[in-house]
């Protein structure tokens, strides 16, 4: 188990090094000068040069990269070109919304998907199975931003149960904050629940064909009992992969939903950084999201090893 853990940690470290190089180089070749954007097209060349020196944009590429990575190692993400405050402060202000939103959407996805998949697998090729698979296909096909607007029209404009957007902050209370996150979380969870339900159903049906399931059935267990007691755990390995990827997507890919609901999260911060050419904000938030994705993948690999003893022994 320790050798397996060490290998996965090495992969995580190498992934982060490669990602930091790629992200920094991409941000360096993006068209547009942040100093020029801040001062305008008719800025005085001397003032422009002074601002570039102040922002560190006149230093060699390698020096800027090493300074940025060195700062990341101690939690210093640099200073925003636009807001003139530490990027870490901007991230801390926004991650308090993005993380709960991602967790809530993932929880809703799991709560919807697992019962639906069990229901469908237990009724394979019958009306219940066909209905669940048809609904899941619709859930995958419907764009989540369009579904979000339907939710706003129904629950905000017509029924007035929820606000149409914005976030009152956690200081306003837990209930108002969660109420503001409910519709965005549902909009994010729908396609993820549909994908997860289809993957889990397929894994369950594949597991039901194994010899040990037939043995369990021969001992008197019903199809549903064999499904819940034996097939479910062994079908979790592909599901864990999907859950890990879904959390990463929900954390990093909620830009459109955050803009639909005017939520001040990490996705909206990246969008604002791109439009304002605040490249230090963009590259710092992106590397943070890459780290989150890589860390989730690492944790999923550890979960694999806990579920499948062959990985702990190194026989796979």
Image (cartoon, rainbow, N blue to C red):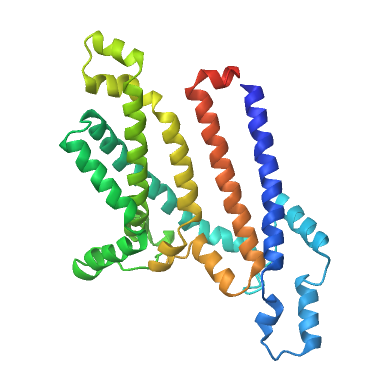
Q: Nearer the viewer, residue 76 or 131?
A: 131
Residue 251: x and y, percent?
A: 48, 52
Q: Is residue 237 left or right of residue 83?
A: left
Q: Is residue 108 shown above or below 274?
A: above
Quarter of the image for the C terminus: give it: top right
Residue 295: x and y, percent?
A: 58, 41
Q: Residue at x 29, y 35 (%)?
A: 117
Q: Residue at x 76, y 53 (%)?
A: 70
| Residue 111, image quadrant | top left
Q: Nearer the viewer, residue 75 or 9?
A: 9
Q: Is residue 89 left or right of residue 256?
A: right
Residue 145: x and y, percent?
A: 36, 63
Q: Is residue 281 shown above or below 128?
A: below
Q: Residue at x 18, y 37 (%)?
A: 128
Q: Residue furthest front?
A: 125
Q: Is residue 311 shown above or below 47?
A: above
């Amino acid at each position: 188990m320790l050798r397996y853990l060490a290998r996965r940690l090495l992969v995580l470290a190498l992934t982060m090094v490669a990602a930091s190089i790629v992200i920094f180089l991409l941000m360096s070749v993006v068209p547009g000068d942040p100093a020029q954007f801040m001062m305008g097209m008719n800025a005085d060349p001397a003032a422009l040069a002074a601002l570039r020196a102040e922002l560190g944009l006149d230093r060699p590429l390698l020096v800027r990269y090493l300074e940025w990575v060195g700062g990341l190692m101690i939690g210093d993400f640099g200073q925003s070109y636009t807001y003139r405050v530490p990027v870490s402060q901007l991230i801390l202000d926004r991650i308090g919304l993005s993380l709960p939103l991602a967790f809530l959407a993932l929880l809703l996805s799991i709560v919807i998907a697992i019962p639906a998949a069990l229901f469908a697998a237990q009724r394979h090729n019958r009306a219940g199975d066909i209905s669940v698979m048809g609904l899941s296909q619709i859930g995958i096909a419907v764009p989540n931003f369009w579904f979000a607007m339907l939710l706003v029209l129904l629950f905000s404009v017509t029924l007035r149960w929820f606000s149409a957007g914005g976030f009152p902050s956690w200081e306003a209370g837990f209930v108002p904050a969660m109420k503001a996150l409910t519709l965005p979380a549902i909009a994010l969870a729908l396609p993820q629940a549909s994908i997860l339900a289809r993957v889990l159903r397929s894994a369950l049906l594949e597991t039901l064909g194994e010899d040990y399931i037939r043995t369990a059935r021969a001992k008197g267990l019903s199809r549903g009992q064999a499904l819940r007691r034996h097939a479910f755990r062994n079908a979790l390995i592909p599901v864990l992969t999907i859950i890990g990827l879904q959390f990463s997507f929900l954390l990093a890919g909620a830009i459109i939903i955050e803009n639909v609901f005017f939520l001040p999260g990490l996705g909206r911060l990246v969008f604002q950084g791109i439009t304002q050419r605040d490249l230090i904000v963009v590259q710092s938030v992106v590397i943070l999201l890459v780290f989150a994705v890589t860390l989730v993948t690492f944790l999923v690999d550890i979960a694999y090893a806990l579920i499948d003893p062959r990985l702990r022994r190194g026989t796979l």
